[in-house]
Image (spheres, rainbow, N blue to C red):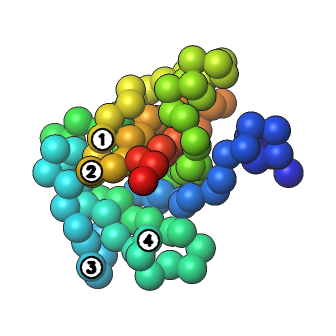
Amino acid sequence: MPQALVEWGWKYHHLGIPTNEKMPGEKYLPQFKFFHSGFPTSPFGVEWMRFEKDSPIHPLIQKVPHLAFEVENLDCELTTRNLKVITPPNPPMEGIRVAMIEHNGAPVELIEFEKK
């Protein structure tokens, strides 16, 4: 098993796949100028992402599929691990903070959910 799972305690959340095809059930995130779909109905956590030409999302994320992991403390993970941050922490939706890192040419998303 990967170190991030067995030693760091990260939990698999989803696989994000860029596409140019319009997908059923797309939801739009205007601040990022992209559509996402598939996650709510996928038993495997597959999410499709379709970007507008002027999306501010890092080009690597727009071209290469990414793995996403849920973490307990996003700030702690980013400061204690040797991670290359390509998108600083931000709230895409209420109660959620994410950051994107790059490892060996692959984008990886870290997600922190607000504790209730």
Residue at image point 65% right, 53% down: 11
- Label 1 vs label 4: CA separation? 18 Å
- Asked whether the residues under the numbered discs 2 and 1 touch, taking CB atoms below 8 Å apart as contact, a structural biologist would say yes
- Label 1 vs label 3: CA separation? 22 Å
Q: Which mark is residue 23?
A: none
Q: Tell me which numbered mark, 3 or 2, is placed earlier along the sequence.
A: 3
Nearer the observer, 20 or 45: 45
Where does label 4 land, which residue?
39
Residue at the far right in the pictured view: 1
Q: Secondary structure at mark 1?
A: strand
Where does label 1 land, which residue?
91
- Asked whether the residues under the numbered discs 3 and 4 touch, taking CB atoms below 8 Å apart as contact, a structural biologist would say no
Q: Amino acid at mark 3?
A: Gly
Where does label 2 land, which residue?
94
Residue at image point 67% right, 46% down: 10
Give left or right: position of 115 versus 82: left
User: Looking at the picture, does residue 62 appear above or below residue 82?
Assistant: below
- Residue 58 locus on image (x, y percent): 35, 34
